Image (tube, rainbow, N blue to C red):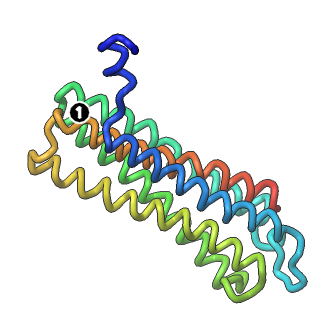
């Protein structure tokens, strides 16, 4: 039997277990979407094809710009959690708010990308297999970013109202785990869609 100090370190709260299970199920979900996308690469018989729409010289540069914002938001959320743990409310609000703004920029950038693909290139879910796979995979990621932003904004508002004291650090940290997952899975989605699939 492990000593009491080690036993306490090994013990996970129900919240941590729940978030780990949620993330594991989301990895399985995205794994299925990514596998489907990879399976259908190059199988379209109707244009436009990914290389026609996701131009190497244009689209990925915009997406890389948006991706930098999303990935940087993981840095800001870590700083926010550390500020809350230290009882620095103003710093927590600043870093948490910056996380929200960077996530929002990513969503707006995705919206502009989709607008260009729909209006300029005529690619939508019903256009061809590429359109179906692209909007399903990237769309579900955007949905997860949106849900994350709603939760982050709710926490920020509660913090402004003084309802998020430092003793809530574990709950806030668990929300950051979800945000790190959303950021991390984007690296895989980006690699599959804009590099491997193009």
Considering depth in this image, is 83 or 40 the residue closer to the camera? Answer: 40
Residue under the point 36% across and 52% down: 100
Question: Residue 161: x, y in percent?
Answer: 9, 50
Residue under the point 28% across and 36% down: 170
Report the side of 168 relative to 13 (left or right).
left
Considering depth in this image, is 7 or 34 the residue closer to the camera? Answer: 7
Considering depth in this image, is 61 or 76 the residue closer to the camera? Answer: 76
Residue under the point 28% across and 57% down: 153
Question: Residue 79: x, y in percent?
Answer: 35, 32
Up-down relation of residue 13 to residue 110 (above or below): above
Residue extending farthest front: 1
Residue under the point 31% across and 53% down: 152
Picture quadrant of residue 90: top left
Report the side of 183 relative to 85 (left or right).
right
Quarter of the N terminus within the rendering: top left
Up-down relation of residue 137 to residue 3 (above or below): below
Question: Residue 184: x, y in percent?
Answer: 57, 46
Count of picture labels: 1
- Look at mark 1 in the image and give the residue it sits on: 84
Report the side of 34 relative to 149 (left or right).
right
Mark 1 secondary-structure assignment: helix
Residue extending farthest bottom: 126
Quarter of the C terminus within the rendering: bottom right
Picture quadrant of residue 146: bottom left
Picture quadrant of residue 164: top left
How many other residues sit within 10 Å of disc 1, few (<14), some (14-19) or many (≥20)? Answer: many
Question: Residue 5: x, y in percent?
Answer: 31, 13
Up-down relation of residue 11 to residue 45 (above or below): above
């Amino acid at each position: 039997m492990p000593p009491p100090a080690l036993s306490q370190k090994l013990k996970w709260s129900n919240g941590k277990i729940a978030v780990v299970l949620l993330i594991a199920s989301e990895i399985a979900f995205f794994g299925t979407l990514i596998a489907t996308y990879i399976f259908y690469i190059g199988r379209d018989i109707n244009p436009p094809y990914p290389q026609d729409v996701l131009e190497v010289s244009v689209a990925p540069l915009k997406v890389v710009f948006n991706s930098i914002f999303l990935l940087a938001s993981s840095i800001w959320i870590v700083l926010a959690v550390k500020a809350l743990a230290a009882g620095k409310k103003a710093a927590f609000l600043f870093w948490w708010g910056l996380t929200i703004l960077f996530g929002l920029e990513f969503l707006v950038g995705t919206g502009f990308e989709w607008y260009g693909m729909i209006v300029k290139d005529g690619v939508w879910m019903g256009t061809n297999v590429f359109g179906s796979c692209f909007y399903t995979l990237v769309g579900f990621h955007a949905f997860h970013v949106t849900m994350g932003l709603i939760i982050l904004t709710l926490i920020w508002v509660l913090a402004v109202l003084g309802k998020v004291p430092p003793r809530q650090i574990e709950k806030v940290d668990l929300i950051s785990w979800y945000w790190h997952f959303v950021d991390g899975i984007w690296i895989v989605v980006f690699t599959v869609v804009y590099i491997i699939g193009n």
